[in-house]
Amino acid sequence: MRQLEGYLYWQDQNRQARRAAQEFADLLPWLTAAQRLDLENHLAHTQLQAARRGLEQFREHRERLREQYGARYHRLRVRCLLAVLLATAVCTTVLLAVVRY
C-alpha cells in the first residue's frame, strides 16, 4: 500500500512540476519549440529534484524521531519494570513481616 501511495504521490509531483514548467514557458512566447521543450524539461527536473530533497529531509527527520522516541520508550519500560520489581519486593517484605508475627 505504501508503495502505491508513494507512486501516486510521485506521479502527482511530476504532473505539478510539468504544469508549472509549462506555465512558466507560456510567459516566454519568443522561445522556439525546441527551446521551450528544453526549458520545460529543465524546470520540471529542477522542481522534482527539490521535491526529492524535501522527501529525503523528511525521511531523515522521521528516522531521527523514531530513534529518539525508541530510546525514550526503552528507558520508560526499564523504569516501569524496576518500579514493579521494587513494589513486589516491598510487598513481599511486608507480607513476610506480617506472617512472622
Image (cartoon, grey):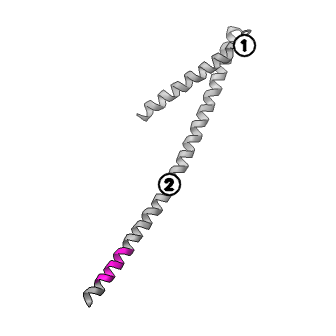
Label the magenta part by its dominant secondary structure.
helix
Q: Position of residue 82 (x, y in %)?
A: 41, 70
Q: Name the residue located 53 percent from the left edge and 47 percent from the top edge.
A: 63
Residue assigned mark 1 = 28
Query: Type of residue at label 1?
Result: Leu
On screen, 98 above or below 77? below
On screen, 98 above or below 76? below
Is tag 2's residue or tag 1's residue first in the polypeptide sequence?
1
- Characterize the local packing of mark 1: few (<14), some (14-19) or many (20 or more) Cα atoms within 10 angstroms: few
On screen, 98 above or below 82? below
Q: Position of residue 17 (x, y in %)?
A: 60, 23
Element type where label 2 sits in the image = helix
Q: Name the residue located 57 percent from the left edge and 23 percent from the top edge.
A: 16
Along the line of sight, which residue is nearer the eye, 98 or 35? 98
* Residue 43, image quadrant: top right
Checking the image for residue 47, the label placed there is none
Q: CA distance from mark 2 to mark 1?
A: 51 Å
Element type where label 1 sits in the image = loop
Of all residues shown, which one is farthest toward the right? 30
Report the span colored magenta: 86-95
Label total for image: 2
Disc 2 and disc 1 in contact, CB within 8 angstroms: no
Q: Position of residue 62 (x, y in %)?
A: 53, 45
Query: Type of residue at label 2?
Result: Tyr
**Does the magenta portion include 15?**
no
The N terminus sits in image quarter: top left
Q: Position of residue 25 (x, y in %)?
A: 68, 15
Of all residues shown, which one is farthest toward the bottom? 101
Q: Name the residue located 64 percent from the left edge and 19 percent from the top edge.
A: 21
Residue assigned mark 2 = 69
- Characterize the local packing of mark 2: few (<14), some (14-19) or many (20 or more) Cα atoms within 10 angstroms: few
